[in-house]
Image (cartoon, rainbow, N blue to C red):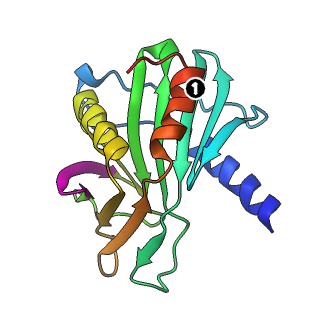
């Protein structure tokens, strides 16, 4: 069961990394992910700290480093959906770092925002499909800095159908997992 979940999570992560990002300004320099990484490209597990796990893999543009976590709590309980996932990604070959994304695991209401609360600091992310991203690299950086200092992040989303959801992620281990991907992708803080 654990091996299956780990394999499923790795495949989900590779799929998520191949999702094209939309809605960002030209200034954001989001990667054009129109060519997904080959399915045979294995992610190397760099390590884990508490509920966060760090990975890296290579693609044409260079090394990609990312960390992931699943929420500790999901409300309303019993809602049928895929597993929610939080992620921070570095793509140094494209001069991109600290890309924050949240996969809610269900289709989000078109035009809605996903809201984050990290120790009282509030952020709104734009949505597409079942995922949410920061609108600018500056917002990505501010969110990552808040996550490094915070204890938890509360994520609220509005589904296309049904009542709003709340996912609560522990930030224990976030800074340590971030340090692993920073080192692997040579990102300086």
Q: Is residue 18 visible?
A: no
Q: Which residue is mark 1?
A: 64
Q: Residue at x 47, y 45 (%)?
A: 174
- The location of residue 55, given as percent across then percent down, is 63, 36
Q: Is residue 145 visible?
A: yes
- The location of residue 120, given as percent across then percent down, is 18, 57
- The location of residue 17, given as percent across then percent down, is 54, 38
Residue 120 covered by magenta stretch: yes
- The location of residue 125, given as percent across then percent down, is 26, 49
Under circle 1, the secondary element is strand
Q: Residue at x 50, y 25 (%)?
A: 182
- Name the magenta segment's main secondary structure: strand
- Above or below 46: residue 73: below
Q: Quadrant of the N terminus?
A: bottom right
- Above or below 108: residue 20: above
Residue 68 covered by magenta stretch: no
Front residue (pair 133, 154): 154
Q: Which residues are magenta?
A: 116-127
């Amino acid at each position: 069961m654990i091996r299956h979940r780990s394999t499923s999570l790795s495949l989900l992560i590779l799929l998520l990394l191949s999702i094209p990002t939309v809605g960002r300004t030209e200034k954001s320099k989001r990667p054009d992910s129109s060519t997904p990484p080959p399915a045979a490209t294995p992610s190397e597990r760099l390590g884990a700290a508490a509920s966060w796990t760090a990975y890296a893999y290579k693609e044409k543009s260079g090394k990609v480093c990312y960390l992931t976590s699943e929420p500790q709590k999901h409300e309303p309980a019993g809602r049928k959906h895929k597993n929610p996932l939080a992620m921070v990604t570095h793509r140094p070959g494209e001069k991109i770092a600290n890309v924050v994304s949240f996969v809610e695991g269900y289709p989000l209401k078109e035009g809605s925002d996903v809201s984050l609360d990290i120790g009282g600091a509030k952020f709104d992310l734009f949505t597409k499909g079942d995922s949410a991203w920061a609108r600018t690299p500056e917002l990505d950086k501010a969110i990552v800095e808040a996550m490094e200092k915070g204890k938890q992040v509360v994520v609220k989303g509005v589904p296309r159908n049904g009542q709003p959801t709340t996912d609560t992620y522990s930030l224990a281990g976030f800074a340590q997992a971030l340090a692993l991907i920073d080192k692997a992708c040579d990102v300086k803080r």
